[in-house]
Image (cartoon, rainbow, N blue to C red):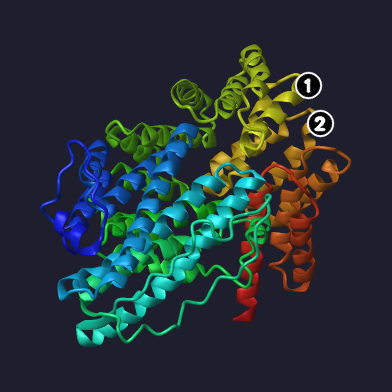
Amino acid sequence: MLNGDEQSVVTGLDEVHIEGDEPATEDDNDLAYKGITLLLTNKWDESKELFGKYKSHSVLMHYGESFVNYVQAIMSMEEDKMSAAKGGLEEVEKRCRANLNNFKRMKKKSKSSQQQDAASQEDRWMSQIIVADSLLLQSVLTFSNQDMPSYIKGGWLLRKSWKIYDKVYKEISQNFEESKRNGKVKVKVESVDMPDPDDSEPVNGHAVAASPPEPSTKPASDESPIELMSKDTLSRLLGAVSFGYGMFQLALSLIPDKVLKLIEFLGFHADRDAGLKALEFSMESRDMRGPLAVLTILWYHVLMRPFFTESISPEQLAETTELIEKYQQQYPQSALFLFFKGRVCRLNRNLDAALQEYEKAKDYCNGMVELRNGAMFEIAWCNLMKLNYDVSLEIFTTLLEESKWSKCFYTYMQALCNGAKGQLEIAATIMKTVPGLVKKKTNQIEAFASRRAQQFKKIKLTDNLCELLILELIYMWNNLPQCSKQEVEKMLAICGAVEEKKFFHIRSLIEGALNKQLGEIELADQYFKEAVARQEGLKFDYHIAAHALFERGAYLITLEDRKQEGKKMLLKAKDGFKEYDFENRLNVRIRNLLKMVESVSVK
């Protein structure tokens, strides 16, 4: 790749001067890699400064800056940062599209010189990859609103990104395979066929049906210039596109069925294994996305899989631990890797070790408020799982004061922790304020907290009820498998002390889940059956019955003589209730469980 003004003239990249900005004296790929390395070594401000310094001369550096802003936004979940990050990604996408249009115009005007050929196709592919990445990240930010228009818009963005990934991934892969045999490849400089920015945009709130297209097989014109591209260049480009391609596959595997139907990926099925394989290739590349691919793999294994599936095998845990340890040698005090290491400790049911890692992450975050708040939340949550309400209360109170994310949820947790400690008057006073703090009715967590709080207008708070509702959240976050036997036994004692009959359906669900963790499977099944019966007739808390049916179905489907009964129960849990709390999460878990059972049956 060429640099600075020379690159702008040769390839048609835009030349916009920003005060204080200067042309780079080294390759922009190396600079971008340095920027990401700064981020991983807790130098967030320096990373943003480096990307910002050269962004007017390099679209890759511009993308790097927008990615750092995206990471900060997604960690904070604060609306102003999410909106700013989305605007930055849209700006990068627009700039890349303008560059690609310049490439087209230049090709029509004159035949490229040999020097132009040497960089043109590389820059075309990189611009296309950045457009696809920008669309994918925009879709993640859009989905976070959790309302139907956002699901439709997010799906539209996803579909547009897939059109690009599918085409570019196959093109670069084919050339890379040839380069492994010959060292260099003769690559024809193709015309750039990009989806229109407004292609298939949702109309009147409805998605427009369209199948993912096959990559174009139209042969290049004989007059298309031919360039030699090295194996190293193709490897880096394949690493770049593999990041988004892999992340896309993993993300799609975690989207609820009803959302997939809305965005109408007709005939498309997410391939988790292909996604992981692509990310593993990317993480070994010298592209700036290489280290990000490592973080994406860790995100999937230690955050998403435990959240949306029943368990992660010891072998998978060992592989994840090995991956973290490998990169900790390169980034020994990286707050991000320490954060993920804490998660691995949780999965190993070692909450004390997890707390130590989260404390280190908090100390090393070096002014990165979003990461510090994330580590603090994990510390509070681990202490909840250990039933240490004092520590959790102190941290949730701090987050309530310092974080802009969900004052409603933090206040609800503050009320429950006070109540669990026996400070019932304080808890009742705080609980009354929760409904008034809801910012968006479509925010599932806030809607849930508000409904729970309103129940106590007629029911007196007790310490046992507050503890039960804390256990309800731990269960809904699928965190009980991360608790030790001693902690689970203490939780069972809490359930046994609950006397308020209006909460018996919740108690039965939690008792079933706790007995399941202790290996008392048949007893657990009885409690789940009881939870369904106790919820029947109520006009609220459908999530209790749905989760209880899921638990029963997940157990029965493992029994050869009751497999069909279990499958029917899972489908009833999935389709028998509508618009209940945590519906999307549960539906993804059900779909993944059914897929896993089907794959085992095929083998």
Q: Note whether 224 is above or below 109 in the view shown.
A: below
Give whichever of 526, 394 is nearer the camera: 394
Task: Indicate the secondary structure of the residue bearing disc 1.
Answer: loop
Q: Position of residue 424 (x, y in %)?
A: 65, 15
Residue 102 seen in the figure: yes
Residue picked out by circle 1:
459
Question: Quarter of the image holding residue 127?
Answer: bottom left
Residue drawn at 37 percent across, 33 percent down: 372
**Which numbered disc covers residue 502?**
2
Residue 594: x percent and y percent?
66, 66
SS assignment at label 2: helix
Q: Amino acid at mark 2?
A: Lys
Determine which quarter of the picture holds residue 398: top left
Q: Is residue 529 left or right of residue 439?
A: right
Q: Position of residue 331 (x, y in %)?
A: 23, 49
| Residue 55: image tag | none
Q: Amino acid at mark 1?
A: Ile
**Distance in Å between CA atoms under marks 2 and 1:** 9 Å
Instruction: Name the image quarter holding the N terminus.
Output: bottom left
- Exactly how many numbered labels are in the figure? 2
Q: Is residue 278 above or below residue 134?
A: below
Residue at x-position 64% and y-position 29%: 467
Would you say the residues marked 2 and 1 are in contact, meaning their CB atoms lie under 8 Å apart?
yes
Q: Which comes sooner in the sequence, label 2 or label 1?
A: 1
Q: Is residue 265 left or right of residue 55?
A: right
Q: Residue 199 versus residue 470: which sits nearer the camera?
A: 199
Q: Is residue 297 visible?
A: no
